[in-house]
Image (spheres, grey):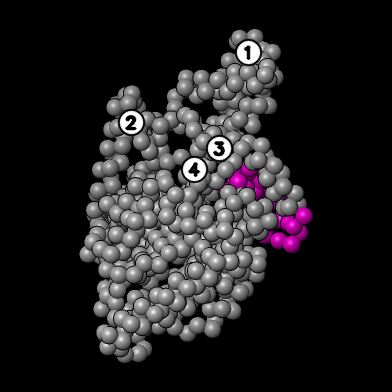
């Protein structure tokens, strides 16, 4: 089932459900009946997950279980493989683009954007290098981007300034939270708290989902190579019926998530123990399973947890997640001391600390104070590692994007899209550099550096765990010259 068919299937499935967006319409059964019914319904939900798991081969089943239990493996890539799948991707686009008017229009006006290898590689990685699914998802992505941000924004990156006041309120609500600590496998963990959606419109919800996933999560190298751990956490009080989203929001949000190049390596549904039936949740789960169709990757990597907050967090810990820094305490209360930390650190890295007061007035006062202090601490660390007090901006902490070139070693650096682009650009100058005299070689290095800068890319170095800063000109030129020497060694061999 392709992404377009999934969207129509989603509409037909959800139109049959009348429980979404409604309040409690039936009396609560007595405790004994409710608890027994809940245990049975948990079995029904877990049975759906088990059914999907049993459809897999033994190897696929073992891989899914390893991902769930935090012992999975990174996505395997080599430079040769990347070039091969990008070539197949382009061939598939050429064959199928006539079926998608949105892509054709975007390609006419913004060809560089849709043909950027780092952009296409996001979709290939999210789909485990399955070219057909990756192309279909890219077409779906562009349609949704045009729908929620307008045709004029499709061929460029979306920024914080593209979000309206309602979007920013939702962003600050705590609905999303990116955990500071990664799980035992080094994977990024994100929490979604449905109770905090409030009265947000479906359009606002989708714009914020786009911003959080595409602008913040997907550029993280670990997310592309390891996948994302997603935790849906119910913080509603056990004596109350959990808030169910409106049908329009549910339809739109699932469709948006399906269009984003993100791979969920593990999904945990954390439901509060309550005197309540789980029929609505099971119905939503069935809809999601039907909509995603043959793409069972996320379905077989899901687990359901049920109990008190202490029990839920114990179960998360058993799956390799550090519960010391999750956004909910043992009593089920949202932790205001770390609320929105991830967002403010992101904005500080973008040099947008000047908008902190505006965000505070929008409802994030406690988080703003805490995170503003954290941002200053990061800058202080940067200064301690060699920056002068008069040049703090140059050494301010930065959140790396796909376009940036990362200095260092390791597979995540080697296969970072920005580094791949950098090597491809430098390779074009390899022969000229080898035959040039010393002074001309310096000019070639400066020329390559200038091209990188004109493309809006940055050379970044890591000065502390998770803290990236912009490298100076000398370090940048040394890196470029070093790459040319590596080309020469490889050529001689």
Give x and y (percent) for residue 165: 40, 61
In the displayed structure, 229 sits above or below 410; it is: below
The earlier-in-sequence mark between 1 and 2 is 2
Q: Nearer the viewer, mark 2 or mark 4?
A: 4
Residue appearing at x 47%, y 85% in the figure: 18
Tell me the CA gap for discs 4 and 1: 35 Å
Q: Nearer the viewer, mark 2 or mark 3?
A: 3
Name the image quarter holding residue 351: top left
Residue appearing at x 54%, y 31% in the figure: 453
Taking depth in this image into account, of 423 and 412 the one nearest to the observer is 412
Q: Nearer the viewer, mark 1 or mark 2?
A: 2
Taking depth in this image into account, of 311 and 99 the one nearest to the observer is 311
Residue at numbered disc 3:
415
Given contact means CB atoms under 8 Å apart, are the residues at marks 4 and 1 in contact?
A: no
State whether residue 429 appears in this view. Answer: yes
Numbered badge on residue 235: none
Tell me the CA gap for discs 3 and 4: 8 Å
Residue appearing at x 68%, y 17% in the figure: 492
Tell me the CA gap for discs 1 and 3: 30 Å
Given contact means CB atoms under 8 Å apart, are the residues at marks 3 and 4 in contact?
A: yes
Residue at numbered disc 1:
440
The earlier-in-sequence mark between 3 and 4 is 4
Q: Is residue 117 magenta?
A: yes
Residue at numbered disc 4:
221
Name the image quarter holding residue 280: bottom left
């Amino acid at each position: 089932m392709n992404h377009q068919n999934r969207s129509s299937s989603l509409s037909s499935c959800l139109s049959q459900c009348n429980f979404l967006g409604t309040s409690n319409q039936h009396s609560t059964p007595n405790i004994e009946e409710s608890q027994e019914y809940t245990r049975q319904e948990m079995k029904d939900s877990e049975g759906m997950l088990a059914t999907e798991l049993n459809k897999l081969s033994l190897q696929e089943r073992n891989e899914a279980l390893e991902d769930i239990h935090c012992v999975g493996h990174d996505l395997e890539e080599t430079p040769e493989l990347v070039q091969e799948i990008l070539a197949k991707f382009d061939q598939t686009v050429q064959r199928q683009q006539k079926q998608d008017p949105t892509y054709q229009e975007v390609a006419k006006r913004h060809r560089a954007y849709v043909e950027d290898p780092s952009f296409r590689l996001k979709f290939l990685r999210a789909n485990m290098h399955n070219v057909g699914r990756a192309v279909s998802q890219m077409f779906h992505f562009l349609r949704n981007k045009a729908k929620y941000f307008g045709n004029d924004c499709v061929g460029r990156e979306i920024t914080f300034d593209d979000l309206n006041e309602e979007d920013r309120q939702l962003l600050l609500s705590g609905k999303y939270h990116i955990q500071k600590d990664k799980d035992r496998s080094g994977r990024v963990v994100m929490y979604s708290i449905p109770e905090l959606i409030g009265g947000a419109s479906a359009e606002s919800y989708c714009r914020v989902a786009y911003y959080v996933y595409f602008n913040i999560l997907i550029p993280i190298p670990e997310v592309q190579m390891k996948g994302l751990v997603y935790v849906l956490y119910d913080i509603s009080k056990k004596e109350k019926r959990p808030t169910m989203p409106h049908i329009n929001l549910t339809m739109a949000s699932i469709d948006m998530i399906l269009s984003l190049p993100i791979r969920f390596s593990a999904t945990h549904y954390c439901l509060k123990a309550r005197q309540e039936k789980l029929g609505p949740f099971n119905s939503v789960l069935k809809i999601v399973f039907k909509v995603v169709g043959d793409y069972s990757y996320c379905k077989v990597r899901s687990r359901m947890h049920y109990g008190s907050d202490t029990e839920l967090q114990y179960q998360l810990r058993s799956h390799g997640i550090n519960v010391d820094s999750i956004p909910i305490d043992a009593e089920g209360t949202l932790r205001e001391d770390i609320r929105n930390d991830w967002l403010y650190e992101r904005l500080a890295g973008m040099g947008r600390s000047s908008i902190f007061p505006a965000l505070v007035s929008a409802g994030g006062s406690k988080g703003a104070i805490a995170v503003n202090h954290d941002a200053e601490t990061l800058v202080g660390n940067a200064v301690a590692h060699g920056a002068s007090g008069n040049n703090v901006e140059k050494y301010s902490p930065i959140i790396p994007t796909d376009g940036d070139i990362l200095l260092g070693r390791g597979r995540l650096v080697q296969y970072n899209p920005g580094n791949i682009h950098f090597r491809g650009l430098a390779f074009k100058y390899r022969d000229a550099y080898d035959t040039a005299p010393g002074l001309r070689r310096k000019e070639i290095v400066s020329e390559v550096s200038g091209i990188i800068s004109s493309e809006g890319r940055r050379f970044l170095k890591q000065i502390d765990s998770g803290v990236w800063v912009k490298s100076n000109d000398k370090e940048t030129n040394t890196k470029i010259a070093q790459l040319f020497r590596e080309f020469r060694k490889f050529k001689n061999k």
